[in-house]
Amino acid sequence: MTVAIETGGSAKTSKGGWSAFITEIVGTYGLAILVVIMIAVFAVLRPGTYLTATNLLSIAESQSITALLALAIVSVLIVGEFDLSFTAVFGMSQVLVIGLMANQHVAWPIACLVGLAIGAVTGFANSYMTVRLQVSSFVTTLGMSTILNGFSVGYSGGTIMTGKLSPIFSALAQRAPLGVEMPVWYVLIVSVLLYILLEYTSTGRHMRAVGGNRAAARLAGISVRRAVTVAFLIAAVVSAFASIVSGSQLSSGQSLIAQGYLLPAYAGAFLGATTITPGRFNVWGTLVGVYLLGAGVSGLQQVGFDPWVQDLFNGAVLMLAVAVSGYLTRLRAGLRRATPAAKKAERQ
């Protein structure tokens, strides 16, 4: 009888172990697997054009600005806030940088620094309103977005700003070392820097603690104000940097260009929370999520779908990503509570 009981317990443990293992694999690598499946499907549908090095590299290059903006908002999402102004920072900074060079004949380094400064000021203002004045980040950044969009249209006159730009500025995004466009390199550099900050510094750990439980973080002596301020500053400055890269790519400033990036950036960030470290916003998962969006859009274009289908695809992916991210978080929490150590701790 004793053996039978031990065997049954072992079977249950084994079953629970397999369940946890499958959940871990699907949660960690499910999105990457989905990217591979999607690429395989479109490769079958368009064998001569889709699964080529040129097309796959083109997807990475075309999604570089989306990737930078998705990385920008990861920090804000980590601390449990929302930012709806990062695309407005992107649009305002772009027309300002191009306008200063083309119309006011400002040297390109100074123009770029002004664009980055606009981002920093916006990030600080967002954090001040959110932390000090206790205004919802949703309301704060929505208002800031409206203000910046107004300034952007006012400064540019609602037109595309063009003019004689420095060849050095144009080369910032139009060169291709090792056959890879510079924007892709910028994405990799920003990703590495953010990863180091979020995973290997006390600032990153404090940001995650604030996002996990703000009250507990305060009791532990963590400065919530500082963590939230850093998060909003990162979002705004990286968005401003993305505007410089975009301006160099296009050699123009477009006041309304930012409107199309809000949904894809959030979709990429939330997709990132479903992979690599499921239930947590993370850098490498965000890149996988953005590439999934890019691979899907490229495939839809090559198959021949109308452009409006891309909006349906991005919206559906965002909804699915939020749902799956929440489910994985609850599932992993349930599995942790079901472990023998957790049960023992509860009994004590």
Image (cartoon, grey):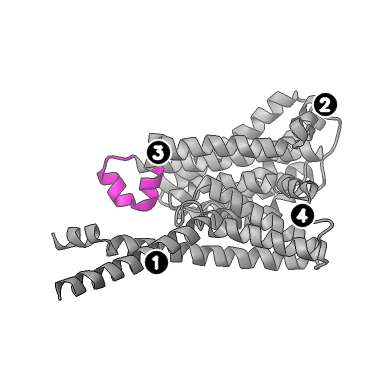
Is 29 rendered above or below residue 313? above
Q: CA distance from mark 2 to mark 3?
A: 39 Å
Q: Residue at x 39, y 65 (%)?
A: 18
Question: Magenta stretch: residue 218 in it?
Answer: yes
How many residues crowd around disc 1 within 10 Å: few (fewer than 14), some, or many (20 or more)?
A: few
Q: Tell me where residue 290 appears, x and y as whole percent.
A: 63, 52
Q: Is residue 46 magenta?
A: no
Label 2 or label 4, whichever comes before in sequence order = 4
Residue 51: numbered disc? 4
Q: Residues within 10 Å of mark 2 (few under 14, many from 20)?
A: few
Q: CA distance from mark 2 to mark 1?
A: 57 Å
The answer to whether one can see residue 103 in this image is no
Q: Which residue is mark 2?
A: 167
Crowding at label 4, few (<14), some or many (≥20) Cα neighbours within 10 Å? some
Amino acid type at circle 2 is Pro
Secondary structure mostly seen in magenta is helix
User: Observer-nearest residue: 274 or 13?
Assistant: 13
Judging by the rendered image, the residue that carries numbered circle 3 is: 226
Q: What distance separates the C-alpha of mark 2 from that of mark 4?
A: 34 Å
Q: Earlier in the sequence, mark 1 or mark 3?
A: 1
1 and 3 marks in contact (CB < 8 Å): no
Residue found farthest to the right: 164
The part of the chain drawn in magenta is: 207-222
Q: Which mark is residue 19?
A: 1
